[in-house]
Image (tube, rainbow, N blue to C red):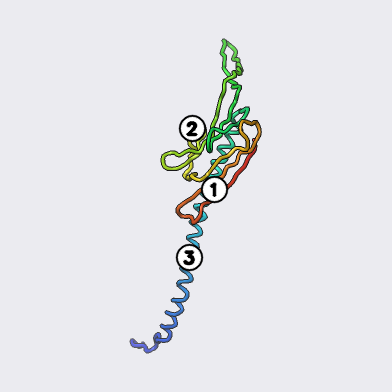
Amino acid sequence: MKIFDERGVTLYELLATLVISVIVLPVIYGVFSSGVNLYNKIQVEGQLRDDADYTATMIMNTFYSFPFDYVRKCGDNCIELVDNTQTSITKDNNENQTFYRIDQDHKKAEASVKLELDEIKKVFLIDGKSIDTVSDFSNSSITLSCDGCGEGMITLDFKLDDKRLKKPLELKSQFGF
């Protein structure tokens, strides 16, 4: 067994390996970095879409769960649902029987959907309670096709922005009542 072997890497082989590495490594890095950037963009857009879907669902649930006679505007980015007759159910307990009484009052009951500034960002409020989302709805709007009507169209224009996106995400939703 020889300790000193004269076979080894030549200068040409070393230079060829370095040239190939200099060509291949930036390509691998470029593919990797664009994959990470695309993943982050998709993650941010997914969160913004989830917030917009959740907000639209909460607004539609308000329309479908609150009995209203007509809808009116209450300012910019504000809609009120108005119920002229309010129905209440009271429970009467006798000795062995339970009775329920249904009363209809002609009082006005209102539910509102507003877009307001809440601390540092704009959020949608339903009856004064904010919809819990992380997105900022600063350039968004809610519009009503007619004022004081029993049938119409609600348009939700969401413009959601994040510092990690190059341009804001714009979503539009419409539903009738």
Describe the element under mark 1 as helix, strand or loop: helix
Mark sitting earlier along the chain (1/2): 1
**Is 81 situated above or below 42?**
above
Describe the element under mark 2 as helix, strand or loop: loop
Q: Disc 1 residue type?
A: Arg
The residue drawn where x is 60% and y is 15% is 99
Q: Disc 3 versus disc 2: distance between alpha carbons?
A: 46 Å
Q: Which residue is mark 2?
A: 128
Residue 49 is marked as 1
Q: Which residue is mark 3?
A: 32
Residue 20 placement (x, y as % from top left): 46, 78
Query: How crowded is the residue under tag 3: few (<14 C-alpha within 10 Å), some, or many (20+)?
Result: few
The residue drawn where x is 54% and y is 48% is 49
Q: Closer to us: mark 1 or mark 3? A: 1
Q: Closer to us: mark 3 or mark 2? A: 2
The residue drawn where x is 47% and y is 51% is 162
Mark 1 and mark 2 in contact? Answer it, CB < 8 Å. no
